[in-house]
Amino acid sequence: MGARHLLAYSDSQLVVKQVEGTYKAKEESMIQYLQQIANLKTKFHYFQIFQIPREENTKADSLSKLASSLEDCRTRHITIHYLPEVRTPLAVQPIVMGED
């Protein structure tokens, strides 16, 4: 998409501090995630991560719940549509997952 500046938001203080390098990761899975983040950060001119209160992170929380509810994410596809302008009112519609 050509983005050169990335602002990331997380409601996890631990994750934010690990990405910033303030805290060291101990779990192997988190170490691998941090390595991927370090590689991805090089593709941007500017990257910053912020901690936000959990109650302000409802959109990301909804997406993570959707992803974790799928039995096998590798066989499912979620289409994301880019909206060039903000549309109001924004409504959320349920997604019905059927057999492929």
Image (tube, grey):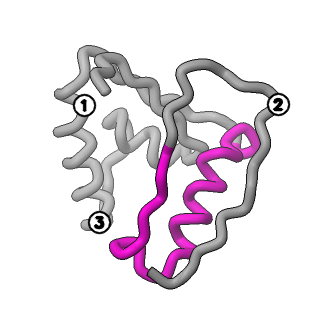
Q: Earlier in the sequence, mark 3 or mark 1?
A: 3
Distance of mark 3 from mark 1, alpha carbons?
18 Å
Q: Position of residue 48 (x, y in %)?
A: 40, 24
Location of the N terminus (image quadrant): top left
Pick whichever of labels 2 and 1 is earlier in the sequence: 1
58 relative to 4 in the view: left or right: right
Q: Secondary structure at mark 1?
A: helix
Residue 89 numbered tag: 2
Q: Which residue is mark 1?
A: 41
Measure how far apart labels 3 and 2 are at the Cα level. 39 Å
Q: Residue at x 32, y 59 (%)?
A: 30
The image quadrant that residue 27 belongs to is bottom left
Binning the other alpha carbons within 10 Å of mark 3 as few (below 14), some (14 to 19) or many (20 upward) gives: few
Q: Which residue is mark 3?
A: 29
Residue found 82% across the figure and 31% down from its top: 89
In the rendered image, which quarter contains the C terminus? Answer: bottom left
Residue 59: say if magenta: yes
Q: Earlier in the sequence, mark 3 or mark 2?
A: 3
* Direction right: furthest residue: 89
Q: In the drawing, does residue 46 fall left or right of residue 88?
A: left
Please name the residue shown 17% across and 28% down the image: 42
Residue type of the residue flagged with mark 2: Pro
